[in-house]
Structure formats: structure tokens, C-alpha cells
């Protein structure tokens, strides 16, 4: 049996494209927010609504409150973490791109910097 790391050299890395990274963050954020989407029952006169992804959980019930809290915290950590990483990259970009390993830094954050020209920075 031949393993993948025996075929490919160690300097070749398969990295996700910038668009794939952003899509992953967007999907995770959407999944975290799915517990907050409610729909009303069409035949119910008591105006109750259920969570769209879990119809057995009523919105505003004791079972729904932890789901909302978990969704808000997850959204803050996933989207906030990605935003903090982008802010960090923008703050240290001038210093890190001038270092010896500047090409590695620019390749890692190319989804932020690929449209900018060096002369304009």
C-alpha cells in the first residue's frame, strides 16, 4: 500500500484557495445561525413557531434558549476569529512582507493581498 506522503514531496502542500476558506467560514456561520430561524405553524391558532432545523423544539421554549446562546457564541467565535485574523494580517503586513519569509506570509494571506500592488502599499 502506497501512502500519499510517500508519493508527494514534503514541500508540496495542498492548501485551500481563498474562496474555499471564505466559503467554509460562511457555511459554519450559517449552520450556527440555523437554530435562530423559526417558522410558524400553519394550522395552529396559538401562534406557536418551531425551529426550522428541529421542528420538535418550540421557539422561545426552555429547549430553544441554549440553542440560541450556542448559536450566538459560535457565530462570534467563528466569524469574529476570522475577522481578527484578517485584521492581524493587515496590521502586520508591511513588516512581515519585508522580512525574509515575506513570500510565505503573502502566500498565506493572498486572499487579502492578491489585488494590491507593491508600489501602492
Image (tube, rainbow, N blue to C red):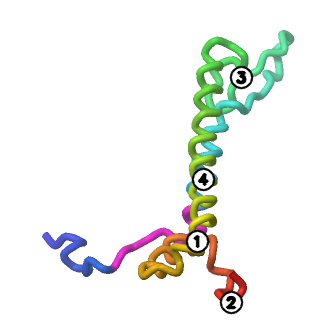
Q: Sequence-wise, which precedes: disc 2 or disc 1? A: 1
**Horizontally, is 3 left or right of 40 in the view?**
left
Residue corresponding to mark 4:
84
For the record, the magenta segment spans 12-21
Q: On the rendered structure, is 8 left or right of 55?
A: left
Cα distance between the residues tagged 4 and 1 = 14 Å
Q: Position of residue 64 (x, y in %)?
A: 64, 20
List the single residue furthest toward the left. Answer: 1
Q: Nearer the viewer, residue 12 or 105?
A: 105
Asked if residue 12 lies left or right of residue 53, the reply is: left
Mark seen at residue 50 = 3
Whichever of callouts 1 and 3 sits on the residue coming sooner in the sequence is 3
The residue sitting at 68% across, 86% down in the picture is 117
Q: Nearer the viewer, residue 90 or 33?
A: 90
The span from disc 4 to disc 3 (Cα, nearest Å) is: 34 Å
What is the magenta segment's predominant secondary structure? loop
* Disc 2 to disc 1, C-alpha distance: 14 Å
Q: Nearer the viewer, mark 2 or mark 4?
A: 2
2 or 3: tag closer to the N-terminus: 3
Q: Horizontal and vertical percent for residue 55?
A: 65, 24
Amino acid at each position: 500500500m502506497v501512502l500519499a506522503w510517500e508519493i508527494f514531496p514534503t514541500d508540496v502542500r495542498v492548501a485551500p484557495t481563498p474562496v474555499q476558506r471564505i466559503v467554509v467560514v460562511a457555511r459554519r456561520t450559517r449552520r450556527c445561525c440555523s437554530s435562530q430561524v423559526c417558522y410558524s405553524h400553519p394550522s395552529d391558532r396559538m401562534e406557536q413557531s418551531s425551529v426550522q432545523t428541529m421542528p420538535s423544539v418550540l421557539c422561545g421554549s426552555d429547549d430553544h434558549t441554549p440553542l440560541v446562546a450556542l448559536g450566538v457564541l459560535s457565530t462570534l467565535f467563528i466569524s469574529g476569529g476570522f475577522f481578527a485574523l484578517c485584521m492581524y494580517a493587515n496590521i502586520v503586513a508591511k513588516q512581515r512582507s519585508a522580512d525574509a519569509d515575506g513570500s510565505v506570509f503573502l502566500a498565506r494571506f493572498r486572499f487579502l493581498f492578491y489585488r494590491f500592488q507593491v508600489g501602492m502599499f
